Structure formats: C-alpha cells, structure tokens
Image (cartoon, grey):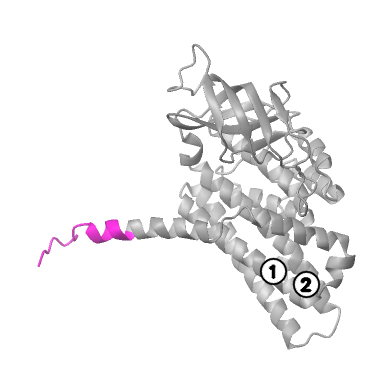
Amino acid sequence: MLEFMGRIGVDADFWDGSARLLEAAEECAGDAPQMLGALRELPPVPVPGRGRTRSLLHLLSSIAAIDLTAARVVEPHFDAAAILAQTGAEVGRGEAWGVFASASPVAVRWLPGADSHSVAEGADAELTGTKRWCSLAAKLDRALVTASDSMGEWMFVVDLRQAAVVPRGGGAPLTGLRGVPSGPVDLHSATARAVGDVADWYTSRPGFAWGGIAVAAVWFGGAVALGRALERAVGGREPDQLGLAWLGEADRLLHGVQVQLDDAADRIDAGSADWALAQRVRGNTASACWRLLALCGEAMGPGPLAFDATHARRVADLTMYLSQHHGARDDAAHGQQLAAALHRSSEAPSISGDDS
C-alpha cells in the first residue's frame, strides 16, 4: 500500500551480518542481552563513507522499525566501529562496544612515556572520575570514552572488564528504553588508550556528522513502525476525512525523511556531509517523529497504549530516544553558524571589483 509505511528496503547482499541482526531484533522484545549476543557473533561490521552508506542506514532503520531497544544496542556498536575505522583500527571479534561521550568530569593522567601531542599509535593514560550516561556499561566489553585535559577533549578505548571500571547499579530508565540501563560509571585510574591524533579529534572529524545522521536513521525506523500502526488502525474501518488526512500526512512526513536520509547517505559517500547537514537531517527527522507520535495518539486513542504492549513500548522508547535531540538549542546552534556565514559573505569583496 504505502511504500514507506510498509517496509524499508534492506539490501540482502550488503553485508553478511544483516540477516542475523534482523532476526535478533525480531526476537529482542526489549531484551538488550539478546542483541549483545548477536553483536558478538558478527563479522566485521560495515562503516559509513565507503560507498554503501544508504544500505547501512537502511539496515539501522529496519532494525529500529522492528524494535527500538535492539537499535539502541546496535547503533553505538556500529558507531564505535566507524570511529575506529577512521584511525585504521576496528572493533574486536566477539566483543560488544559502546560509545560514552557525555560531558562528564573525567580527568586524564598520561602515563610516563606517553606523548599526548602525538597519539596516532595510541598513548596510554589513566582516567579518573564519573562518566554519566553509560548505556549497558555492565554488559559491554569495551567502549570509546571521552575525557578532557588542558589541551581539550580526547577519546580513549577503555576495557570495561577491568576492576578500575565500576558501573553503578540500577540506571534503568523509568519509562522508555527500560532494557538499556544508562547509569554512571566510576573510573578509578582506569587504563585507557587514546584514539585520534589531536585533542578534540572526536568532534572535529567528518565522521562526527555521520554518526549524528545514523542516529536520525534509527529515529526514522521507529516512526515507520508508528506509521504502519496508523495504517492498520485507519484501514481497519471505513476512514473519514480525518483518518484520510492523518494517513496522508504520515506518508508525506515519512517519505520526506527517507529522501533526506538517502541524500545524506550519498553525501557521506561523496565526502561532502558536514555537521550543518547533520543538524538539518536530525532536526527534520525529530520533528517528523514527534508529529507521528501525535498523529497516532489522535487517530488511535488510548486503547493501544493501554492494551497493546508492543505499541506502548514503542511509543515510550521513541519518546525517550528523541529526547537526546536538543531541539531548539540545536536549531539555535545551526542558526548561529548560518548567521556567521552570512556575515562573512557580506564582508567579502565584490567579485566584480566595482566599489561604486
């Protein structure tokens, strides 16, 4: 019926781990360990920027359309692989990875012999402090962790199985993504190895925008699942004008986001995707997702939230997931960049050389 509500195309030949992840997502039912087991069985995971980024985003969206908890486990593992790939490294086979990049007071102490100005080979350090928002830290094997010193922010590989890494108990959200505990982790001189060759490498590299777009692809997948639920609800009865309007708006929103994500994927492969593009994609995707949540509430009423456990969990999960988008604050940052660019343009000399 409606293409973007019905399914997201997954390229079967894209990567030989796709079928395993989709199968695990079908079995997940909000159970993160189910997905962690699947991640540890995978061959080397695909990374963006190598000509198949559309297929990669379609896979993430497809997993999210099945189960958002599954996608919440998979996306940071893929992000870690993409980050490491930009240094020539890769995630270890049989390991599940996370990315802990929240702003937190974690101190860096470079170990003797480590040259913090040149860490392309990986400099040893010790990290001390409390890192916030460390999803699944007690169940993962390794993570990429940010910490700062006087020169700026660094990213480190941290083995989460060492005794110096202590995830705090609890940390499960009260509602939404309840299967993904995201409490703090205490680091007590935890051994770490730097990745990237300069301070602030993590946020200044092109891949930072790519990771932000991948998260938007996950949000989109959750919205597609809502669109399917709306389609079933409207199709189950003779639709009135409101039902038809809701259905048409949902398809329009989802189609627009899919086109924008595909364009962003092509720009990633072409090397022209920057953070401004990521802000547009994330902002438009988040807005569409919030509207899909509202449309489902209007069209379906309280029944599915009260009696359909899968739908109720999806609504809660997507609401929690979208909350990591900063909305108006991100728009303000984007607007500031646009204003600065306009100011620079207005100050540039005329190309005609006419000063009159």
Q: Which mark is residue 190?
A: none
**x, y percent for residue 194:** 54, 25
The residue furthest left is: 356
Q: Looking at the image, is 258 positioned above or below residue 40?
A: below
Q: Is residue 46 visible?
A: no
How far across and how far down the image is residue 251, in percent? Answer: 68, 72
Residue at mark 2: 230
| Mark 1 burial class by Cα count in 10 Å: few <14, some 14-19, many 20+ | many
Q: Earlier in the sequence, mark 1 or mark 2?
A: 2
- Determine contact: label 1, label 2, CB under 8 Å: yes
Q: Quadrant of the N terminus?
A: bottom right
Residue drawn at (29%, 59%) of the image: 343
Q: Which residues are magenta?
A: 342-356
Query: Residue 292: which disc?
Result: 1
Q: Amino acid at mark 1?
A: Leu
In terms of secondary structure, where does tag 2 sit?
Answer: helix
Q: CA distance from mark 1 to mark 2?
A: 9 Å
From the image, which quarter does the C terminus lie in? bottom left
Q: How many marks?
A: 2
267 over 260 or under it: above or below: above
